[in-house]
Image (tube, rainbow, N blue to C red):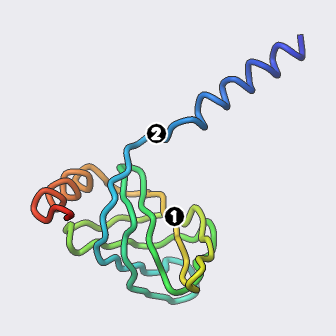
Amino acid sequence: MTNSLFFKSRSTTQQFTGKRADERIRTKVTALLISGSDRVGMETGFTENVSLRGARIITTKRWRRDETVLLSLPGFHFASGARVAYCDSLRDGSFGTGLEFTGPIEDLKIAALATMIEFPRK
């Protein structure tokens, strides 16, 4: 019986790791991150992609995992609280910072799509 639970759990895990929950929109816009923790910090970076649940931001400094930040995307007229999900070092010395939104997010996808239509990639 333990084996069948193991296999059931394993197949469920495989089901969820195969595809992301939200479609990501690849877009590059200015992002402003403001630290919500005891250390005061602010940084301007740029998005690599956005989704309804979060964004990947390219930053010049390392952000701590689980740190709370305020994310503003001025080009999208969007701001939300977010949690740092990860912060990976990149080859050029910058960091790929994954943020999970903790605030309202409904307008972000519409704004991202509108920006892509207005400024199509060549």
Looking at this rendering, what residue extends furthest in the left direction? 118
Q: Which residue is mark 2?
A: 21
Mark 2 or mark 1: which comes first in sequence?
A: 2
* Residue at x-position 55% and y-position 66%: 84
Q: Is residue 64 left or right of residue 26?
A: right
Secondary structure, mark 2, is: loop
In the foreground, 10 or 104: 10
Q: Is residue 65 left or right of residue 71?
A: right
**Looking at the picture, does residue 23 appear above or below residue 32?**
above
Residue 47 placement (x, y as % from top left): 37, 70
Residue 104 placement (x, y as % from top left): 32, 54
Q: Mark on residue 98?
A: 1
Where's the C terminus, which quadrant? bottom left
Q: Mark on residue 57?
A: none
* Residue at x-position 74% and y-position 26%: 10
Q: What is the quadrant of residue 66 in the picture?
A: bottom right
In the foreground, 122 or 114: 122
Secondary structure, mark 1, is: strand
Looking at this rendering, what residue extends furthest in the right direction? 2
Amino acid under disc 2: Ala
